[in-house]
Amino acid sequence: MPLVGADMNVLGWALLLFLVLPIATTAQGPGVFALRTMLQDKTPEIRMKAAEGLGRVGGRQAVIILRQGLADKSATVRVAVVEALGFIGGRLSMTVLSEALKDKSPEVRLRTVEALKDAGTVNSIPIIQKAFGDKEVSVRLHAALMLKVIGHRRGVPVLAKVAVDDKSPAVRAAAAAYLGKVGVKDRRAVGALAKVLEDKESTVRIRAVEALGFLQLAQAIPVLKQALKDKNTGVRLRATEVLGRVLAKDFE
């Protein structure tokens, strides 16, 4: 009977472990083997230090060993593991970190998002995008922040979708604000923020107005003029201020 789905995934990792772990003990010496052993120590603090050490050693062997640490019963240790994976970086680390986005601890998932930013920068954006499906607002807020920190245009469509669709006003507002930083001179951001101006929450609409002021695009002017008709005084006030700044080409 052929193997499919999860069975293939398990088989793949088992084969990788079989091929790589013996190399870890020979190519990088008995020290790596010792850290692998200490990652299973009964004391959480020691397991944390082992994870940190493996992060410094780096390489594929360390990543494979650290993956085992994602099953640690201590959330603090699992945080140390994902941080070590972020420090090592690379595609294999990002693959392992994508698994940690399903961790039962919100703190581990939040730190995983940050580690993904460290591990792959621009290449990590599609994986960070998965974090917007997290039930915790704090995790989704951090995912938006990491897209801002990465600062690449590949993040524009992701933030645009979140700014419109997320169920939390705080997350929508953050995504709208960050579009003003990530979407500079990107016309897609103008269209996205125009949609955000239809949001039922005035705080979200205000962030959209502010973001339009940073795009350095003339196309933002008609959208800002529309915001001058908003039913909320705060939105109209901010739109008036931002429009004056845009017309003066003052984008700071």
Image (cartoon, rainbow, N blue to C red):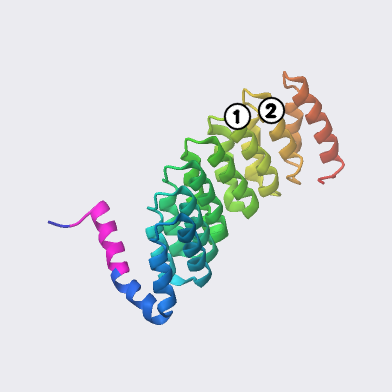
Q: What element carries label 2?
A: helix
**Residue depicted at x 25% and y 61%:** 11
Would residue 3 be seen by someone viewing this image from the given angle?
yes
Main SS of the magenta part reads: helix
- Magenta span includes 213: no
Q: Quadrant of residue 143?
A: top right
Q: Residue furthest left?
A: 1
Tell me, for residue 169, which label it has, or none. 1
Q: Residues within 10 Å of mark 2 (few under 14, many from 20)?
A: some
Q: What element carries label 1?
A: helix
Closer to the camera, 119 or 107? 107
Residues under numbered marks 2 and 1 in contact, where contact means CB atoms less than 8 Å apart = yes
Closer to the camera, 100 or 130? 100
Q: Can you say whether 124 is above or below 242 in the image?
A: below
Question: Which quarter of the figure is the N terminus placed in?
Answer: bottom left
Tell me, for residue 203, which label it has, or none. 2
Q: Where in the figure is residue 67, as x and y percent of width and height?
A: 40, 60
Q: Where in the figure is residue 87, as x and y percent of width and height?
A: 54, 63
Q: Residue furthest top?
A: 231
**Residue depicted at x 31% and y 62%:** 13
Q: Where in the figure is residue 112, as x and y percent of width and height?
A: 50, 51
**Residue depicted at x 41% and y 54%:** 70
Q: Can you say whether 79 is above or below 170 in the image?
A: below
Q: Which amino acid does label 1 sit on?
A: Pro
Q: Which residue lies furthest to the right in this view?
A: 248
- Magenta span includes 4: yes
Q: Is residue 37 left or right of residue 238?
A: left
Closer to the camera, 74 or 213? 74
Q: How far apart are marks 2 and 1 (CA)?
A: 8 Å
Magenta residue span: 3-17
**Residue depicted at x 42% and y 58%:** 95
Q: Where in the figure is residue 108, as x and y percent of width and height?
A: 49, 47
